[in-house]
Amino acid sequence: MRRHFWIAAIAIAALAAGWWFGRNVAPTHGSIAAENASPDVGNPGANARSNVPKPTTVRAQSGLPTNTTSVSKPLPPPGTPLKQTYDELKARADAGDAEAASRLFQDAQRCRRVRQLTRLTPQMAKRWLDEKTDGATAENLQVTDAFLGMAQSQLEFLRSNATLCSDAPEQVDSSLPLALLAGQLGDLAAANCYVGGGDTFGIPSGVVDHPEWLSEYKKNALAYADAAVEKGDWTMVSQLAMAYEGNVPSLLGQVTGVDATMTYRYLALSRLGVQDNGKDQAITHLDARLKAMAENLTDEQKLAAADWARNAYQSYFTNHPKNPAHNSFTVCPSGGP
């Protein structure tokens, strides 16, 4: 029974948030970097970041228009089956319609989640409905109830999106290109999903058949990460910190490489966005990560990183001073469980 407890706990965590990644990005080397350039001398990771192109350059390189077009007509009513709207939304997004690109990305994410849950939820719910409760501890019963509650919310999500996702195009299974398109047009949620690999687990669906997506990702990912940080996006700060830290395998980490200085910068920035009340274990964990990373740096490097973080916080996060992503986050939200 104890074994079942841990299986359930893992399943609940995975299904509740699409998976925890502590993957919940960090400032770019623009004017901030220029003020603190000297500490990066001899640091390959930092020097590479200083040459990251701005998002407008990336869009031009990718062949997309550099300016979004105004919306010429209203979007289809919410809930309209994606099989009916996909071609129209895609064409409008390709032409630079930011609202259409975001709508397409959001609807596709919902339908991807529907397909995932359609495969998983019924069999998992049945398994736990059939679970023997004779002799179960209160702890075991609590976990089972929590899992069944999650399964119920997932079934409700499936019902509420049945019309939207009925016979949805198979393209919804590949998030990366749709996330890139919406991210290029200013959708921060899409940019985070793209930088996170286009999927909750960071493994892009469809990439085996489209290896060019990886080349495109390598060229674009850091530029979009930097742009999101400049817009005050805490989720991207956390993604970059984890990528440079290298403790969790990720597509972004393969672009950044492991870099203690860059990790410390983003962790220091993340720390500025939280208030320590003495009870938050997540903040304690963040402080422990900072301390561990500091052991790999000189005093000069730590001071430079702290200065950079303060400058970035003041420059980019005035309108978003509190960091909700210091502990955990979702990189590819679907709008459901």
Image (cartoon, rainbow, N blue to C red):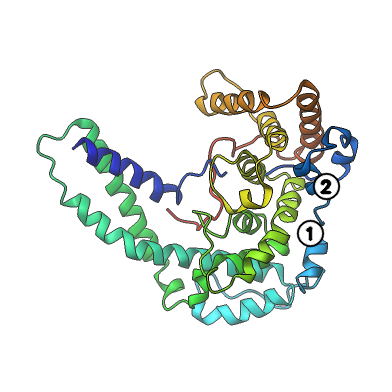
Front position in the image: 224 or 292: 292
Side of 227 relative to 175 (left or right):
right
Q: Nearer the viewer, mark 1 or mark 2?
A: 2
The answer to which image quadrant residue 167 occupies is: bottom left
Residue at 73 percent of width and 73 percent of height: 71
Judge from the rendering whether residue 327 lies leftward or rightward of residue 291; answer left or right: left
Amino acid carrying label 2: it is Ser
Tell me if 19 is positioned left or right of 87 in this view: left
Residue 74: x and y, percent? Answer: 66, 75
Disc 2 designates what residue?
50
Q: At 62% across and 38% down in the image, what residue appears? A: 245
Q: Please, is residue 235 above or below residue 76 in the view?
A: above
Q: Secondary structure at mark 1?
A: helix
Other-residue count near label 2 (Cα within 10 Å), few / some / many at <14 / 14–19 / ≥20? some
Q: Which residue is mark 1?
A: 55
Q: Is residue 288 above or below residue 164?
A: above
Residue drawn at x 90%, y 36% is 35
Q: Is residue 60 visible?
A: yes
How many callouts does the rendering have?
2
User: Residue 329 location in percent, x, y?
Assistant: 54, 44
Q: How far across and down, in percent of the image, does residue 180 sit? A: 66, 64
- Label 1 or label 2, whichever comes before in sequence order: 2
Q: Which mark is residue 143?
A: none
Image quarter (top left, top right, bottom left or bottom right) of the N terminus: top left
